[in-house]
Image (cartoon, rainbow, N blue to C red):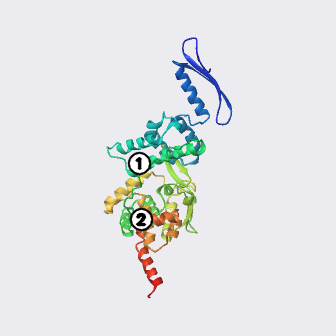
Amino acid sequence: MTVKQAKNGSWFTQFRCRNKFGEEVHKCKRGFDTPEEAQAWEDDFIASAGCTMAMAFEQFYEVYKADVMPRIREHTWRNKEYLIKSKIMPHFKNCRMSEIQSIDIVRWQNDLMDGSNNKGKGYTQTYLRTVNNQLSAILNHAARYYGLHPNPTVRTMKMGGKETSEMQFWTKDDYLRFADQMMEKPRSFLIFEILYWTGIREGELLALMPSAFDLERKTMRIDKFYQRFDGRDVITDPKTPKSIRTIKLSNFLVDEISDYLRRHPEIGLNDRMFPVTKYQISRTMKTGCEKSGVKKIRIHDLRHSHVSLLIDKGFTALAIADRMGHETTDITFRYAHLFPTVQENMANVLDDARGDF
């Protein structure tokens, strides 16, 4: 028997078990009030050490974290961790993995769908789907690598859905009106010039260094991404492998970048060209919109604006995707409504193909 009573009347457990690497582990834990508490602690430890599905959800989360966190970007993991700890852990943390049933997931979903955020509003369908995906990811990981069977997510319906909001963008005239208000602020002017005329992401812009440019060849290399964590600047890899790309620059943009670098000789080859924050850019954009009378859009909508400009100029989805660091299918589906003549052209071609009887 591994659980025994000590001379002072408390209970302790002393045992040996094997961890997930097959190594023998000796463990002794004292100070329990009852033999049941000591046995429960021993059972939990053995389940956790061996990564068996008898462990609690809270314990398996640490296993999941150790497996997954090194494989994804820091920002992505932080978002996952927040959702798991705030929306999933309170409901499932004490449940043993092997005892989680499909009905437990259904009841958790119902509670969230009836819940509300800190502003008293119900959660959006997109948010509910995102949270649901986090629980599914944990349980699928347990099923795929640690023998969880059956997987309780298999028989449940997904919660939430993908909401489609109206895409906001500026026309070229909108942008030029806005840019006029930026002329007296050279750094802000160039920031928005690059965002609008190249369509790069805000994090890509903030990671730009002089070394990214070959001004003789008129190119800009995108292979870094800027983020800010806990008051520190972090340069990471781009969002996806597809995001690593070389963008050809227009002559006027080459001239503007060259002039900016000449005016700022203190910027080293591997220094950030724009040592500002996303908040500062957003605030500057808000002020420029108010002064110019142009409708307020998000910084990311400048990327949509660039795509819309390229579509209007007749470029194909394949060419646009290559410039934007997207898959072609992403451009096709996301911006389908901006290709207004495609369906009509298809119908006309089919008319010609059919011919007259």
Q: Which of these two is toward me, 249 or 305?
A: 305
- Residue 69 in view of the camera: no
**Residue 55, position in %: x, y?**
55, 34
Q: Residue furthest right?
A: 23
Query: Dot 2, how many residues are within 10 Å of its Cα: few (below 14), some (14-19), or many (20+)?
Result: many
Mark 1 residue crowding within 10 angstroms, few (<14) / some (14–19) / many (20+): many
Q: Which residue is mark 2?
A: 305
**Residue at (56, 37) in percent of width and height:** 53
Could you say where residue 314 lies in the image, as x and y percent from the top left? 46, 74
Q: Quadrant of the C terminus?
A: bottom left
Which disc is residue 85 wearing? none
Q: Is residue 348 left or right of residue 41?
A: left
The amino acid type, in three-letter code, at marker 2 is Ser
| Amino acid of disc 1 | Leu
The residue that disc 1 covers is 128
Residue drawn at x 36%, y 69% is 173
What secondary structure is marked by label 1?
helix
